[in-house]
Each structure stands twice: as structure tokens, then as C-alpha cells.
Image (cartoon, rainbow, N blue to C red):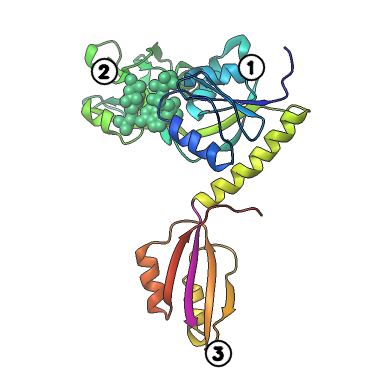
Amino acid sequence: MKTRDRLRIAMQKSGRLTEPALDLLTRCGLTFRQSRDKLFCFGEGEPVDLLLVRDDDIPGLIAQGVCDLGIVGRNVLNEFQLTGGVDAAPLHEWRPLGFGRCRLSIAVPHDMAYERASDLGGQRVATSYPGLLGDWLRTQGVDTQVVTLAGSVEIAPKLGTADAICDLVQSGGTLVANQLREVEVLLESEAVLAGPQTLPADERGDMIELLLKRLDGVIQVRESRLLLLQTSRSTLEAVTRLLPGGPQPTLLPVAGQPDQLMLQALCAGEVSWRQLEEIKKAGAREMFVLPVEKMLA
Ligand SMILES: Nc1ncnc2c1ncn2[C@@H]1O[C@H](COP(=O)(O)OP(=O)(O)OP(=O)(O)O)[C@@H](O)[C@H]1O
Ligand SMILES: O=P(O)(O)OC[C@H]1O[C@H](OP(=O)(O)OP(=O)(O)O)[C@H](O)[C@@H]1O
Ligand SMILES: [Mg+2]
């Protein structure tokens, strides 16, 4: 295949991962010219283009070298690794991206007795993930018939085409609506940045390394908060003890008030109202929690 000098990233054209994936790439400083109804988006600033496709096609496009990277659910990536056939050059999960969280679970009708995997012996389980389910059943040593369906898996037990199901669960609402009970979690999933196991040894490899660094910065700050507060020197120790985890806080003098200090702390996650109230009780005042926009270590 002709080598490209621009990086090409595959992502879902229209679905659950589309908005958060575009948002993430935008935060990494990438902008695109084409309208999103098109299959191809040309990158304006950096030499990075997008291919907008069905999520199921993303691992194959990377394995064939049509795209250098893809943003796809771990469920789809791992299923491809198990069932992709000749196309299935081993892929690598370069980064978990923290959105599109769900799990692949086995669920059974409320009236079916289930205590352990062996209870599935001789039963039929419907799924759109025959690779992941088959792999799990093998590790459990259970002989179960896998019924592969493209969608609407949750109604298979009612239709009598299966005894149990193996499907994605997020809120659990679909299971409740279909009188099903979740009994095993096979995979915890989220969107990931997938790519080949070894990066291309040309400019595209350099571009991927740059993108990974930016992604790390974006992912790290997405949850980060900067906490600013004032405290007197006498309450500093008590206040510091209550600070949420993160690197050592910075202390600054307050002009004209020698016993007062301004404290600045980077917190790894949300700072709740309750935490703020506790810190205030310990002697802090003038507290601010600020989102962090960019960070470069
Ligand atoms: N409740 C959920 N149900 C299904 N997938 C979810 C859920 N929450 C997060 N996801 C993740 O989002 C991914 C995309 O889900 P979506 O329903 O948009 O896919 P799709 O219908 O297969 O889309 P496409 O048209 O691209 O094939 C899933 O593969 C999974 O990783
Ligand atoms: O636990 P929940 O929050 O209910 O989410 C899980 C459900 O969502 C998905 O279906 P979707 O609504 O996308 O329909 P589809 O199966 O036709 O894609 C998935 O296949 C489950 O059925
Ligand atoms: Mg799909």
C-alpha cells in the first residue's frame, strides 16, 4: 500500500462515541474542514485526517493499514481480536479514553436459577459478541451454545430463541425492562485509542507520539481542579491534611497580612461541596475551585 504522510484516524460516524471523540480531538488542538456528513474530514492545522465509519469497521481499517489509529469501544476492539479472521493483525490499546463506559455481561431471566458459570451448561446464550462470550465460556470450561444475533439481543429469551443473553449494559435499564438479571461481567469497556502494535517509523509515528502526549495532558486535566484558598499560618496544617490528593500545594504570601497564606493545590478529581465545607471548618476561607484547561508536564 502507498505510504501516506498524513495521519488518519477512524472514528464512529454517528453514535454514542461520536460527540465525545470529536470533543477530545478538538481539545488536543485538532480541527477539521469537511462537514461531518461526509466520510472524510481533512485536518486543518495538523496533518491529521478523520475517517467517519461504523464502529464495527474501525479495528479492520487499522489492521489493514487504511487508518493509523481509531477511537472505538474496547468491546468492539477485543471482539475483533478474537473473530477478525485474516484481517486480525494484533492491535494495541494505546490509551483508555474515559468515555463510552459500559460492560459486557451475561443476564438471565428472573425465573432462571443461576449461581455459577456451570449453570449455563447445555443452555443457549444470545449475543452480538460471540468471540468474547466463546472465550469466556472456554475459560470457565462450560459447554454452552452461542446464538449470534446482530441486535435486539435482550428479547431473545422471551422469543424462546435463547435461554440467556450476553450484551452491553450501561444503566441496566434494558435488563430491567426485559425482566433479566445480570449475573456475570465479562468485560469492563470504555472508548479506547486503538492502533497497530508498533508505530510507523516515519512522520506519522512522530505525529502519533505528539498526539499521545497531548491526549495524556487532556485526559489528566479533564478531571483536575485547581483549588485556591486563604488560611492563617496557624490553621495551615489542619487545612493541608484535608486537601484531596495531588502534588504538594504551593503557598504564597498575602500582601499586608503576614500571618495569612494563599494556598494553591492541583486536585486529581472533583472537589465536592462536603470536602470544601470540611476544609473551611478547619480554617480556610476565600475558597475557589477552578477547572484546568491545559497542562503540559
Ligand atoms: N448503553 C450502551 N449500549 C451500547 N453501547 C454502549 C453503551 N454505552 C456505551 N457504549 C459504547 O458505545 C459504543 C457505540 O455504541 P453505539 O450504540 O453508538 O454503536 P452502534 O449502534 O454499533 O453504532 P454503528 O452505527 O457505528 O455501528 C459501543 O460499542 C460501546 O463501546
Ligand atoms: O443498560 P442500558 O443503559 O439500558 O444500555 C444497554 C443497552 O443499550 C444498547 O442498546 P441500544 O439502545 O443502543 O440499541 P441497539 O441494541 O439497537 O444498538 C445495548 O445493546 C443494550 O441493549
Ligand atoms: Mg456498530
Which labelled disc corresponds to residue 155? Answer: 2
Question: Looking at the picture, how far across and down is residue 150, in whole percent?
Answer: 38, 13
| Rendering quarter of residue 6 | top right
The residue type indicated by label 2 comes to Ile
Main SS of residues in magenta: strand
- Depth check: 238 or 67 in front? 67
Question: Residue drawn at (49%, 38%), measured in percent from left and top?
Answer: 23
Question: Residue drawn at (60%, 29%), measured in percent from left and top?
Answer: 43
Question: Residue drawn at (65%, 34%), measured in percent from left and top?
Answer: 46
Question: Looking at the picture, how far across and down is residue 100, in whole percent?
Answer: 43, 35
The residue to which callout 1 is attached is 66
Question: Looking at the picture, how far across and down is residue 125, in whole percent?
Answer: 36, 17
- Depth check: 2 or 236 in front? 2
Give the quadrant of the N terminus. top right
How many numbered marks does the figure carry?
3
| Rendering quarter of residue 65 | top right
Disc on the earlier residue, 1 or 2: 1
Residue lying furthest right: 201
Counting other residues with Cα less than 10 Å from the Cα at mark 1, is it few (<14), some (14-19), or many (20 or more)? Answer: some
Question: Looking at the picture, how far across and down is residue 145, in whole percent?
Answer: 39, 12
| Rendering quarter of residue 177 | top left
The residue to which callout 3 is attached is 258
Which labelled disc corresponds to residue 45? Answer: none
| Residue 227 colored in magenta in the image | yes
Q: How far apart are marks 1 and 2 (CA)?
A: 37 Å
Q: How far apart are marks 3 and 2 (CA)?
A: 70 Å
Please tell me whether mark 1 sits on a helix, a strand or a loop: loop
Give the quadrant of the C terminus. bottom right
The residue type indicated by label 3 comes to Pro
Q: Is residue 129 visible?
A: yes
